Amino acid sequence: MAGPLAGKRILIVEDEYFIASDLTNAMTDEDASIIGPTGDIAEATRLIAEEAPDAVILDVNLNQNSAYPLATDLQKRDIPYIFLTGYDASYLPAEFSSVPVVAKPFAMQAVIDAVGRIIGPPPL
């Protein structure tokens, strides 16, 4: 039986190479199709427009830049996403209070579960 990520297109926006690599491997193990990874906001914006991901894993800080403009774009496009951050969720702006947050350091299963929840159950 396929899991909720099977066949889903997941964009990984993370600027730390080893974390991006680990996320890519974990999502691939869940039979997801990976877009990226990228740690660049402009590249992520292009990939969102061109590749139409089913969900996005978004680091809050990308090379010392806030990812909030990218998150706003995702909301406008109705693309579900989760935040990865080393900050407490209470530091997020109010407009992102409903976005799932996985705190760094994280257990990979927590990320898999969070992405599965925002995508929804697999088709029967």
Image: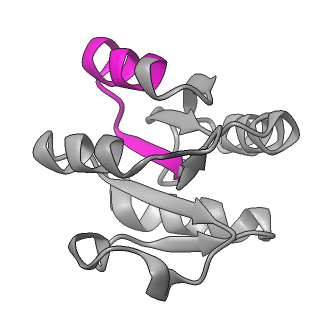
Q: Residue furthest bottom?
A: 90
Using the image, determine if residue 6 lies above or below residue 115: above
Can the viewer see residue 25 in this picture?
yes
The colour style of the image is one colour
Estimate the x, y position of residue 51 in percent, counting from the top left: 34, 16
Estimate the x, y position of residue 92 in percent, counting from the top left: 41, 75
Q: Is residue 17 left or right of residue 119?
A: right
Residue that appears at 29% across and 70% down: 96
Estimate the x, y position of residue 66 in percent, counting from the top left: 47, 49
Question: Would residue 5 be counted in the magenta stretch?
Answer: no
Residue that appears at 88% across and 39% down: 18
Q: Residue furthest left?
A: 76
Question: Would residue 49 be counted in the magenta stretch?
Answer: yes
Nearer the observer, 39 or 99:
39
Using the image, determine if residue 70 lies above or below residue 1: above
Residue that appears at 70% across and 34% down: 28
Can the viewer see residue 121 in this picture?
no
Estimate the x, y position of residue 36 in percent, counting from the top left: 58, 21
Nearer the observer, 73 or 81:
73
Q: Is residue 25 left or right of residue 83?
A: right
Q: Residue furthest front?
A: 64
Nearer the observer, 124 or 76:
76
Q: Is residue 82 left or right of residue 77?
A: right
Residue that appears at 30% across and 11% down: 50
Using the image, determine if residue 37 lies above or below residue 119: above
Using the image, determine if residue 33 lies above or below residue 91: above
Question: How many numbered marks does the figure carry?
Answer: 0
The segment highlighted magenta reads: 43-58
Quarter of the rendering containing residue 120: bottom left
